[in-house]
Image (cartoon, helix red, strand yellow):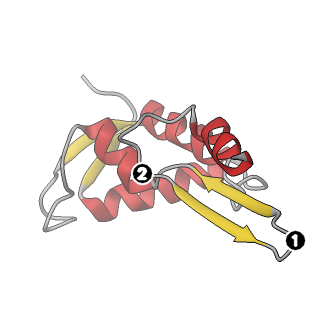
Amino acid sequence: MAFCKDFNARTQKYKSEAPIAATVTVFKDNTFELSVRSPSVTWFLKKAAGIDSGSGRAGHVVASTLTLKHIYEIAKVKQADPYCQYMSLEAISKSIIGTAKSMGIKVEKQLD
């Protein structure tokens, strides 16, 4: 019962359709350790761009366009993840821009 309460408390900030990664480690004394990560960067990019999948020919065909504001908002969410908590927002944003480019999503300073 404690596991269910802990899991629900940690995942209540995410929407029901958001795929989250959870790692559960159970010890012999019936205690557990739960690690919950936010959805992947690609999921956030696809949701922000309003597309189902990236471009089949990234670099040649643009699937969608996002602004730096979208990238910054995704970076703020990802900074809460355990493996990103010590990275700067700038470093996380650069990584997200690289992922967007590989998906065929163009990042602009501002849309017209």
Amino acid on which the number 1 mark rests in the picture: Asp
36 lies left or right of 96: right
Vertical comparison of 67 with 87: above or below: above
x and y percentages locating residue 90 in the rendered image: 64, 48
Query: Which residue carries the number 1 mark?
Result: 29
SS of the residue at dot 1? loop
Q: In which quarter of the image is residue 55?
A: bottom left
Q: How far apart are marks 2 and 1 (CA)?
A: 30 Å
Query: Which residue carries the number 2 mark?
Result: 19
Vertical comparison of 74 with 20: above or below: above
x and y percentages locating residue 108 in the rendered image: 34, 39
Q: In which quarter of the image is residue 82?
A: bottom right
Q: Quadrant of residue 18?
A: top left
Q: Residue lying at the far bottom in this picture: please name it.
A: 28
Residue plotted at (37% across, 55% down):
42
Assess disc 1: are there few (<14), some (14-19) or many (≥20) residues with their C-alpha within 10 Å of its C-alpha.
Answer: few
SS of the residue at dot 2? loop
Residue plotted at (31% across, 40% down):
47
Amino acid on which the number 2 mark rests in the picture: Pro
Quadrant containing the C terminus in the rendered view? top left
Q: First in sequence: mark 2 or mark 1?
A: 2
Total labels: the figure holds 2
x and y percentages locating residue 51 in the rendered image: 19, 44
112 lies left or right of 94: left
Assess disc 2: are there few (<14), some (14-19) or many (≥20) residues with their C-alpha within 10 Å of its C-alpha.
Answer: few
Residue plotted at (13% across, 67% down):
56
